[in-house]
Image: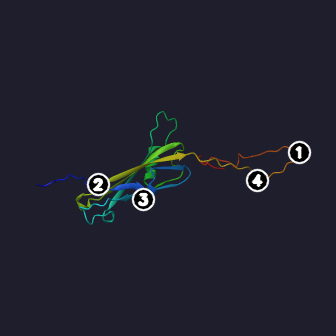
Amino acid sequence: STVVTKSTSPTLTVGFSGGALELTTHRPANLSLVGSVSLPSVACMPGLSIDSLQVSFSWQLAPVPMPNASTTATPAALLARTISAQRGRQLIVLADTLQPGTDYIASLSATPAQAGGGAVGAGAASLILHVSASPLVVAISGGSRRTAGAGSTFRLDASSVSYDPDARTTP
């Protein structure tokens, strides 16, 4: 008698550098996401390895839908331009692109070329990207020391040199 075992093709295992599932970043910083891809060892397919496959990568970046959210997320057109900065396994999100206080889903899909008769399936992974507000930059005009006589008017000015890094302009 013959035993037939049904099996599916092996699929690419996709992940992110360091095994990250969540990251936190600030708006003014460039962000580089790097994907990793591997192929589980398959005893019935000798000679098949990740090095023998041509793999194409596709990135997606989208705001996480928040019920009753009052903040507006980064417009889809801007995210599409950011996605065009991808380089295979790497996605570069330019500074000032993402909205502070918004969470995003970054997804990476890896699709092998049809080498081996299509014996290897595509894989995908996602991570949550938290964009937090940057700390305010606060400084006082005139340096770190001031001397004033008793009874004289003393004025502190932080407005001309302090700023919010998440705002589009700085002093």
Name the kind of residue labelled 1 in the image. Ala
How far apart marks 4 and 3 lie (CA) works out to 45 Å
> Is 102 positioned to the left or the right of 140 in the image?
left
| Label 1 sits on residue | 150
How far apart marks 4 and 1 lie (CA) works out to 19 Å
| Label 3 sits on residue | 87
Element marked by disc 1: loop
Q: Reading the chain from its start, which is encountered first: label 4 or label 1?
A: 4
Question: Which of the 4 image quarters holds residue 48?
Answer: bottom left
Q: Reading the chain from its start, which is encountered first: label 2 or label 4?
A: 2
How far apart marks 2 and 4 lie (CA) works out to 62 Å
Q: Nearer the viewer, residue 54 or 128?
A: 128
The answer to whether mark 3 and mark 1 are in CB contact below 8 A is: no
| Label 4 sits on residue | 144
> Is 128 positioned to the left or the right of 112 in the image?
right
How far apart marks 2 and 1 lie (CA) works out to 79 Å
Q: Nearer the viewer, residue 161 or 125?
A: 125
Identify the disc placed on residue 39.
none
Question: Which of the 4 image quarters holds residue 84?
Answer: bottom left
What residue appears at the point 53 percent right and 50 percent down from the top-left corner?
A: 25
Q: Reading the chain from its start, which is encountered first: label 2 or label 1?
A: 2
| Label 2 sits on residue | 121
The answer to whether mark 2 and mark 1 are in CB contact below 8 A is: no
